[in-house]
Amino acid sequence: MSGYDLVIIGAGPAGLSCGYEAIRQGQQPLILEQDSVVGGIARTVRFGDYYFDLGGHRFFTKQPEVEQIWHTILGSELLRRPRLSRIYYNNRLIGYPLRPLDCLAKLGVLQSLLVIGSYIRARLRPVAEAEDLAQWMTNRFGRRLYQMFFQAYTEKVWGMPAQQISSDWAAQRVKSLSVAEVLKNALGLAGGRHRSLIGQFEYPRLGVGMMWRRMADLIGDGGGRIAFQHQVGQIHHQDGQVMAVTAHTPQGRREYRASHFVSSMPLRELILSLEPAAPAAVRRAAKALRYRNMITVMLIVNEPDIFPDNWIYIQSPHVQVGRIQNYKNWSPDMVPDAAKTSLGLEYYCWEDGDSWHMPQEELIALGQQECAELELINPDQVVAGTVARVPKAYPVYDRGYAQRVGTIREYLSSLPNLQVIGRNGMHRYNNMDHSMMTGLLAARNICGEDHNLWQVNVGEDYLETADK
Ligand SMILES: Cc1cc2nc3c(=O)[nH]c(=O)nc-3n(C[C@H](O)[C@H](O)[C@H](O)COP(=O)(O)OP(=O)(O)OC[C@H]3O[C@@H](n4cnc5c(N)ncnc54)[C@H](O)[C@@H]3O)c2cc1C
């Protein structure tokens, strides 16, 4: 048993940012990480001399502080990259933002007119209280545009009809892109480009994982410690204080005492790990939280230029793949042989679903076959492949999730020396920047500041179309 000022659970972007800030504040944190590497779902995997992100991670933020940390840590290794992403719809690749001639050429005059008509109809007669994703998107884009550009991909990600997905997700992601802007873009009338349509983004030379490896080194240099293969299984509390956590390690169980605890482990598991157990209603709420898993199939193809996009959304219900990354377009240094291309195919599934357990060879064959079906590659040109499984890639925003999180949050306020941060840690659809921000603020709270972490990523005018 050891005693620390601060124990942090998880060495993803949120946990590492908390450790980094704790060191800047003069503390020496201990980070317990179940995996053998840092970065969580924002890690970069190495396959031979090829690098791939589990899903490409753009560095974009409206938080100046986070941006400064990225630049300080990565310096000239943070590249500015051109952005191109298109939507695969009906055997065609349609550029986004929409361009009138491109749309006319690919959708045809009739379809384009129907899109505009359906948009006008939605604007004239919107659903008053749009509670689910389908209604919310239809209100903003019109039914046709929603069905063409969002429905199939979104339903693949979430594994359920859009009518069962809370509109909170879209509201968090699509905030201020009005259809007027979309149409202005489509008709070529837009003056300035919307934030979500920006044509560039920042990205580390060897993938997002570079950021987390460097941050981990800085934490070590500053006197902090990261203990790998330490899976926190029990959280012991008494009289309104968390006293210790027990981690399962290859050497057996280890208990760590501390004055403060910060957790980025999934909220469901956190609640179910409490000893003594949380009240029945809180446990029920935790057990009902759901997550979507993701599988990335990486294929190395013996062709230099397959498509120029960073990624493509696959709006085709006939294949299971939801999005395809082309890593050399993120950073050429991620692919050691310019004559080859590495693709990352994203598949989404439930933790008890069949595809989650599919053998690697079958997944590679599926990826190969679907890319051929989409006429992106010649399957004979695939020279190697590998698979990365990402548990709990997406905290699910189904109907009722917000109430469950509310119940849990209220209970957690009775344990003031335990703070929850990050994406699954708060069951909140946070990108890296917001995940990092919660970690930074949690460390400052320990030093006497008073930040409400639940206010991070609330009501902020954000960047995206329904990208992630
Ligand atoms: C496909 C995809 C694409 C994305 N693209 C972008 C993008 O372009 N830009 C962007 O900004 N963000 C993007 N994100 C979001 C980004 O990945 C997350 O915001 C970020 O990784 C969350 O960081 P975190 O530390 O909260 O969680 P995680 O990354 O999940 O880290 C949590 C860590 O805790 C560890 N852990 C869990 N349980 C325990 C336990 N019991 N004991 C010990 N350790 C434990 C895990 O192993 C993990 O290392 C994307 C996400 C996905 C899935």
Image (tube, helix red, strand yellow):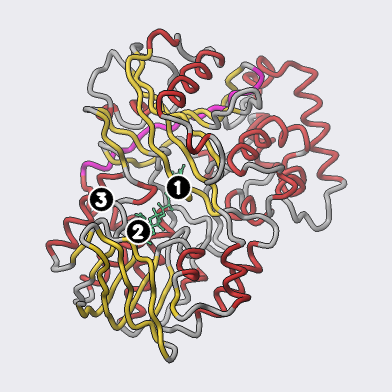
Would residue 431 be counted in the magenta stretch?
no
Up-down: is 264 above or below 179?
below
Q: What number is the disc on residue 391?
A: 1
Report the magenta residues as a range. 76-90
Would residue 77 be counted in the magenta stretch?
yes
Residue 186 rendering spot, x and y as whole percentages: 66, 30
Residue located 69% across and 35% down the image = 183
Quarter of the N terminus within the rendering: bottom left
Q: Is mark 3 within 8 Å of ligand 1?
A: no
Q: What number is the disc on residue 2?
A: none
Q: Mark 2 highlights which residue?
A: 66
- Classed neighbour count for the residue bearing mark 2: other residues with Cα under 10 Å, few (<14), some (14–19), many (≥20): many
Mark 2: secondary structure: helix
Q: Dots 3 and 2: beta carbons under 8 Å?
A: no
Q: Taking 370 as reference, is 237 left or right?
A: left
- State the CA–CA distance, disc 1 to disc 2: 26 Å
